Amino acid sequence: MGKRLLTLISVVGILVVAGVARAEEQAGLFPLGRSWAGDRELPRPFGIGLNFYHQEQDYHLTSLTVNLPNVGLAEAAGVGVENTTNEVDVKADLWLLPFLNVFAIVGDVDGETTVDPGPPLSELEVDYEGLVYGGGLTLAAGGKLFFGSVTMVLTGTELDTSSSSVEAWVLMPRFGVHVGRMAFWVGAMYQEAEERHSGHISLPFFGNVNYDVELEEKEPWNYLVGLSAGISKHWNLELEGGFGDREHVVVSVGYRF
């Protein structure tokens, strides 16, 4: 019930932001406090975009419990785990203040997590798909040439199985430079992910047994580089790649008005 409510809030949030920004476009209300920016050129206040996100990283196994018949509970720790995540979402954002952008996202997530605890347990592969939702904010400052920003994002999921859940909190500091209608940046991503799955696994001699596994990212930080290009005064394209213990690729197409 709680997840469905958060999903509904995310969808309604996108619609409200879109409606408010559209209604106020002619009046030029946003961003509030426009005069604080002086003579700096500000981006159009409202944006809506389509984002494609791919991520690969190692997980740390925090808990693995397997209920073996006539044996009881077997636990494994310190096992390497691999995760691949693909996400497509729609993002609506609003520059509420010259230095503050707020946004909401909703989309589809498709993931695969592989756990190999070793004998006597066989490899456990969990595939999941479902709805991803969330929101966040960006604090930004800069001049005609250089800029800096910090983005914070909180996401949850409504997956196709009630026995799985994935939640993440992300922090991304960036520092970059404007070159004409393009921008280039470097930065880092801090991610706190919590993933949990439970279900059944087939084991030799034991048949189907119950399992419960809890996971978190092995290394919370990775580095990133990115660029954006203004295709026109309304359309914008962004590309970003992450490297280190976590690899990610982001492709975003946005429209601002």
Image: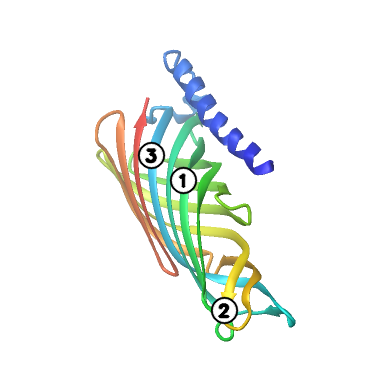
- Which badge, 3 or 2, is on the more N-terminal residue? 3
Looking at the image, how many numbered discs can be counted on the residues? Answer: 3
Can you tell which quarter of the image residue 211 is in? bottom right
User: 223 or 20: which is nearer to us?
Assistant: 20
Q: Which label sits on residue 79? A: 2
Q: Is residue 97 visible?
A: no
Mark 2: amino acid: Val
Farthest residue to the top: give it: 27
> Mark 3, mark 2: which one is toward the viewer?
2
In 3D space, how far apart are the residues under numbered discs 1 and 2 (Cα atoms)? 29 Å
Per the image, the residue denoted by label 3 is: 50
How far, Cα to Cα, is label 3 from label 2?
36 Å
Which residue position holds label 1?
A: 108
Q: Give me the residue at 69% from left, 42% from top.
A: 2
Q: Quadrant of the N terminus?
A: top right
> Which of the colour schemes (rainbow, by chain, secondary structure, one colour) is used?
rainbow
Distance CA(mark 1)–CA(mark 3)? 12 Å
Q: Amino acid at mark 1?
A: Asp
In which quadrant of the rendered view does residue 236 lie? top left
**In x, y percent, where is residue 28?**
44, 17
| Residue under the image location 51 percent in, 26 percent down | 15
